[in-house]
C-alpha cells in the first residue's frame, strides 16, 4: 500500500492523504501513529485510518515522516468507536482523537519513571558480610543501613536476594547519602535504577467479595439469564440495595475468564471511595482514569490497558466518561453506574458525546455485555427496558432489609410566615440535626449552588451587578470577598455602593453552600463542619481528603453540591437535609422534573445505609408539587409514567431525537441575521420539526451572543440522510459573506 489516510488532532472535517515512503511500506497500517507535516511548518502525530493505493487527485502528496511508537497503536475497535462518535454526534474525527489521547507533548516526553534501588553485592559470602558488619560498629549509620538491607532484601531467610527501594530503606533507618556512598565504595552494596509505575502504589487484593444476600443472588442470576439473549441489562435497584456488590461478582467472573472490565462512574468525586473498595477485592489489576491525572499518568494507564506496559497490566478500569477511549483489547463487561447522570454528557467542546451511550457502543463493538445501573433510571433507559430493547432486573429492597429513608417535607413558606425560620433552616431540619448530633451521628446538607449568595441587590433601586462578558448575575463569594461569574470565571471586587443610585444598601440574596456553612457553624458552634463543592476541591487530592475525614468521623456535618449527592456510602450518616428543592424543579427544561426526582432520590439515598432507617428533610415552598409527592413515597414508577406521558404529548425524547444548534456571534444583529437564515434553511428541509431560533435563558457568554435552534426528528427514520442535509446547509451558511465571526455548534441528544 502506497498511501495512508490520516486523522489529525485538529478540528478539520477530513482525513488527509500522505504517501508511505518505501522504507515504511508494510509497517504503516490502520491504527499506526505517524508523524506528518501539516501546513507550512507544523508537524503532528496523526493516526492512520486506512491505507490504499489510490493516488489523490491533487498531485503533491507529502511523505509520512516517521512512525511514532510511544503509545503502541490504536486498535481497530477504537478506530470504529471514533468513527461512530464523529458520525453520530456530528463532529470531526480530529476532535474525537483529541479527546481520546493524552496530549502529544505528554506522549513524546513521556519517560518511564525509575527509582533507585540498593542491593547487596552478589559475591559476598556470609562470613565476609559478618566481618563487615563487625567492622562497622563504629559507623552506626552504615551498620543500620546494611543490617536493614540484609533484612529487607531477603538475605537473612535464605530466599532470593532482591534490591530494595532506596527511599524505603532511608525512611526506615537513620542512614544518610554519605553512609550509602561509603558502603558502595567498600564494594558491599551497589545501586540500580528500576522502572516503577506512577499509578501503582501497593495494591494487594486482601479480601474476597462479599457473599450475596438472597435478593442480590436472585438479581445476579436474573442478569446472567438476560445476558444469554440480550447484551444490555438495566439494573434498577433502590439506593443501597447492594448493586455495587452485584457488580463486584460480575467483575470477579470476568477477571477469572481473563477479560477486561470497564466500570464507569459519572464523577471524579465518586472514584476515591470506589477505587479503595475495588483495590481491596481485585488488587493490582485495577486502575482509575479521569481528568485529574497528569499526562504521564494517563500515558501509563493507556499502556497498561493496552497490555503493552511491561510494569503492569490493567484489567479493571474505574473511570469517568473519557475512559471509553482507552485501548481495551479484550473487553468482556461494561458497567455504567448512575446511568441517568447528566455528567456523562460532555457539553463543550466537541465531541459532545454521552459517555453512557458511547460505552454501550464500545461494549457492542467488543461483543461484550453492558450493565446500566441506577436507583432512578433515565426515562430513556427505563423505556428501553420496558419495551424489551434492554433486559430489566429490579431490586426493591435495601441490603439487610433496612427501610428506605423517611421523607419529611418542611414547608418554608409557612415557616417564614410564622417566623419560625432560623436563617435558612426550618425547625424540622434544625431539630433533626440537633438530634443526630446528640447521638453522635452524621449529617449531609445539600444545596445545589456554590458560593455565598447567587446575587447581590441594591435595596433602594433593585440594581444587580452582572458579568461584563455574560448575561448572568454575579455570585458573591465571601471567602474571596469577590463577585464571580460562574459561566466565564470573570471576577471583580465587591462594590461598596450601588452602581446605579450610589446607595450603600447592597444586600445578598439567596444562598449557596458557603453561606450554609457559615450559618450552620453559628447555629451549632460545637459541630465539626466541612464543605464539598467546586471551590473546596480544586487540588488533586481534595475529594479524597474531605470524603476520608467524613468517613473517619472527623466531620459531623458535610455541606455540598451535587458532588455529595450520589454513590457515596457512609456508615454513620442518618440525616440528609435538602435545603431548597424548588430551584431543582423550576428551570425551563423538559428534563427538569426527571432531574429533580433523581437528585432528591440520590441524595436521600445517602441516609441510613446501615443498621437503621435514615431521615430526609426536604425544604420547599411548594409541598404539593407532584415530584415532591413522588419522592416522599420513593415512587419511581409514578414519576416515570407521568414523565413519559408528557414526553409523548409534547413530542420529546424518547419519542423523538433532538439535535440542538447553538449559533454564536459577538455582534447581536449579525447573530440575528444568521440564525434567522439557518432557521429558514433548515425549515425548508425539516418543516415543523424545527423550533426557533430562540434566545436561551443565558443569551450571552464571554461576549458571544447566543441563539438556539432545535430539530426534532423521528426516531425510526434513518439519520444519515438528515445529517448530510444539515452538513450541506451549514457549509452553505459558512460560505456566506460576513459569516467569519459566526460559530455554530451541534449537540446531538442534548442533555
Ligand atoms: P448500592 O450500590 O445499591 O447503592 P451498595 O452495594 O453500596 O448499594 O451497598 C450498600 C451497603 O451495603 C454497602 O456498604 C455495602 O458494602 C453493603 N452490602 C451490600 N451488599 C452486601 C453483602 N452482600 N454483604 C455485605 N455487605 C453488603
Ligand atoms: Zn441602587
Ligand atoms: Zn461571565
Image (spheres, helix red, strand yellow):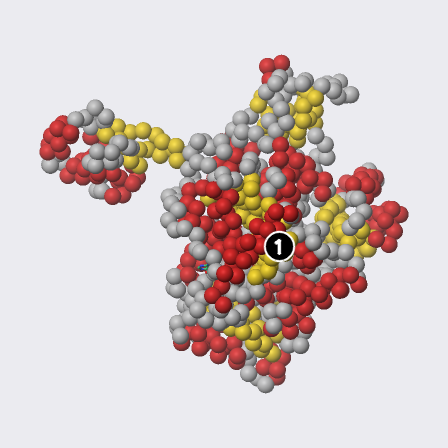
User: What's the residue at 74%, 19% (across, down)?
Assistant: 55
> In the displayed structure, would residue 263 be above or below residue 507?
above
> Which residue is most to the bottom?
418
Q: Quadrant of the N terminus?
A: top right
In the image, taking residue 359 as reference, residue 659 lies left or right, namely right
SS at circle 1? strand
> Does residue 245 appear in the picture of this structure?
yes
Mark 1 Cα within 10 Å, few/some/many (few <14, many 20+)? many
In depth, the one of 69 and 538 nearer the eye is 69
Q: Is mark 1 within 8 Å of ligand 1?
A: no
Q: Quadrant of residue 640?
A: bottom right
Q: Quadrant of residue 27?
A: top right
> Does residue 106 appear in the picture of this structure?
no
> Which residue is most to the right?
684
In depth, the one of 511 and 613 nearer the eye is 613
Q: Position of residue 96 (x, y in %)?
A: 64, 39
In the image, taking residue 182 as reference, residue 427 lies left or right, namely right
User: What's the residue at 26%, 31% (across, down)?
Assistant: 160
> In the displayed structure, would residue 61 be above or below residue 190?
above
> In the displayed structure, would residue 290 be above or below residue 374?
above
Q: Position of residue 6 (x, y in %)?
A: 66, 28
Where does label 1 land, which residue?
A: 234
User: What's the residue at 59%, 32% (across, down)?
Assistant: 75
User: What's the residue at 49%, 55% (across, down)?
Assistant: 245
Q: Quadrant of the C terminus?
A: bottom right
Q: Position of residue 463 (x, y in %)?
A: 67, 68
Total numbered labels: 1
Q: Position of residue 747 (x, y in %)?
A: 72, 48
Amino acid at each position: 500500500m502506497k498511501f495512508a489516510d490520516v486523522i489529525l488532532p485538529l478540528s478539520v472535517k477530513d482525513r488527509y492523504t500522505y504517501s508511505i515512503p518505501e522504507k515504511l511500506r508494510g509497517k504503516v497500517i490502520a491504527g499506526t501513529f505517524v508523524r506528518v507535516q501539516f501546513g507550512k511548518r507544523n508537524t503532528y502525530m496523526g493516526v492512520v485510518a486506512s491505507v490504499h493505493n489510490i493516488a489523490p487527485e491533487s498531485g503533491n502528496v507529502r511523505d509520512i515522516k516517521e512512525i511514532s511508537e510511544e503509545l503502541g497503536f490504536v486498535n481497530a475497535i477504537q478506530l470504529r468507536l471514533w468513527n461512530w462518535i464523529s458520525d453520530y454526534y456530528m463532529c470531526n474525527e480530529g476532535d474525537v482523537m483529541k479527546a481520546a489521547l493524552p496530549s502529544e507533548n505528554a506522549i513524546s516526553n513521556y519517560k518511564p519513571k525509575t527509582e533507585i534501588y540498593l542491593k547487596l553485592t552478589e559475591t559476598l559470602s556470609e562470613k565476609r558480610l559478618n566481618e563487615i558488619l563487625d567492622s562497622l560498629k563504629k559507623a552506626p549509620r552504615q551498620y543500620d543501613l546494611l543490617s536493614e538491607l540484609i533484612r529487607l532484601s531477603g538475605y537473612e531467610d535464605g530466599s532470593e536476594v532482591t534490591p530494595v527501594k532506596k527511599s524505603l530503606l532511608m525512611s526506615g533507618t537513620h542512614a544518610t547519602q554519605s553512609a550509602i556512598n561509603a558502603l558502595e565504595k567498600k564494594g558491599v552494596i551497589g545501586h540500580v535504577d528500576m522502572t516503577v509505575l506512577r499509578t501503582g502504589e501497593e495494591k494487594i487484593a486482601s479480601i474476597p467479595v462479599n457473599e450475596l444476600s438472597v435478593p442480590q443472588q436472585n438479581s445476579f442470576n436474573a442478569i446472567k439469564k438476560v445476558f444469554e439473549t440480550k447484551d444490555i441489562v438495566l439494573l434498577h435497584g433502590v439506593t443501597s440495595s447492594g448493586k455495587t456488590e452485584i457488580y463486584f461478582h460480575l467483575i470477579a467472573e470476568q477477571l477469572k475468564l481473563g477479560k477486561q472490565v470497564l466500570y464507569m462512574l459519572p464523577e471524579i468525586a465518586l472514584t476515591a471511595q470506589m477505587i479503595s473498595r475495588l483495590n481491596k477485592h481485585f488488587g493490582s489489576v485495577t486502575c482509575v482514569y479521569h481528568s485529574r491525572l497528569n499526562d504521564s499518568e494517563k500515558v501509563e494507564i493507556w499502556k497498561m490497558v493496552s497490555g503493552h506496559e511491561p510494569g503492569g497490566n490493567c484489567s479493571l478500569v474505574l473511570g469517568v466518561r473519557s475512559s471509553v477511549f482507552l485501548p481495551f483489547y479484550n473487553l468482556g463487561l461494561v458497567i455504567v453506574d448512575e446511568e441517568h447522570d447528566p455528567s456523562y454528557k460532555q457539553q463543550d467542546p466537541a465531541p459532545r458525546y454521552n459517555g453512557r451511550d458511547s460505552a454501550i457502543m464500545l461494549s457492542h463493538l467488543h461483543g461484550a455485555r453492558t450493565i446500566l445501573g441506577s436507583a432512578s433510571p433515565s426515562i430513556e433507559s427505563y423505556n428501553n427496558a420496558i419495551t424489551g430493547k434492554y433486559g430489566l432486573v429490579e431490586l426493591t429492597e435495601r441490603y439487610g432489609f433496612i427501610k428506605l429513608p423517611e421523607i419529611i417535607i418542611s414547608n418554608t413558606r409557612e415557616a417564614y410566615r410564622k417566623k419560625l425560620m432560623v436563617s435558612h433552616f426550618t425547625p424540622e431540619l434544625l431539630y433533626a440535626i440537633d438530634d443526630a448530633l446528640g447521638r453522635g451521628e452524621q449529617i449531609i446538607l445539600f444545596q445545589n449552588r456554590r458560593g455565598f449568595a447567587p446575587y447581590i441587590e441594591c435595596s433602594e433601586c433593585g440594581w444587580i451587578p452582572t458579568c461584563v462578558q455574560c448575561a448572568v448575575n454575579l455570585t458573591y463569594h465571601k471567602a474571596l470577598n469577590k463577585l464571580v461569574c460562574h459561566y466565564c470565571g470573570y471576577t471583580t471586587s465587591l462594590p461598596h455602593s450601588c452602581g446605579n443610585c450610589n446607595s450603600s444598601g447592597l444586600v445578598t440574596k439567596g444562598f449557596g453552600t458557603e453561606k450554609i456553612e457559615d450559618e450552620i457553624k453559628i447555629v451549632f458552634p460545637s459541630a465539626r463542619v466541612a464543605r464539598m463543592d467546586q471551590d473546596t476541591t480544586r487540588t488533586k487530592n481534595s475529594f479524597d481528603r474531605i470524603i476520608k475525614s467524613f468517613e473517619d468521623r472527623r466531620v459531623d456535618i458535610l455541606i455540598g453540591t451535587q458532588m455529595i449527592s450520589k454513590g457515596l456510602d457512609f456508615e454513620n450518616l442518618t440525616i440528609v437535609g435538602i435545603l431548597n428543592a424548588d430551584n431543582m424543579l423550576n428551570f425551563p427544561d423538559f428534563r427538569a422534573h426527571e432531574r429533580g426526582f433523581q437528585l432528591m432520590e440520590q441524595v436521600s439515598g445517602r441516609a441510613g445505609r446501615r443498621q437503621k432507617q435514615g431521615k430526609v428533610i426536604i425544604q420547599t415552598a411548594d409541598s404539593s408539587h407532584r415530584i415532591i409527592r413522588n419522592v416522599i413515597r420513593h415512587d419511581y414508577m409514578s414519576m416515570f409514567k407521568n414523565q413519559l406521558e408528557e414526553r409523548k404529548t409534547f413530542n420529546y425524547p424518547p419519542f423523538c431525537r433532538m439535535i440542538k444548534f447553538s449559533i454564536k456571534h459577538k455582534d447581536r444583529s449579525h447573530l440575528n441575521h444568521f440564525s434567522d437564515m439557518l432557521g429558514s434553511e433548515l425549515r425548508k428541509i425539516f418543516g415543523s420539526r424545527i423550533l426557533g431560533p430562540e434566545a436561551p435563558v443565558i443569551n450571552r457568554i464571554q461576549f458571544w451572543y447566543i441563539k438556539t435552534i432545535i430539530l426534532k426528528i423521528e426516531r425510526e427514520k434513518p439519520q444519515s440522510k438528515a445529517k448530510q442535509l444539515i452538513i450541506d446547509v451549514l457549509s452553505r451558511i459558512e460560505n456566506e459573506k460576513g459569516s467569519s465571526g459566526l460559530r455554530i455548534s451541534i449537540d446531538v441528544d442534548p442533555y
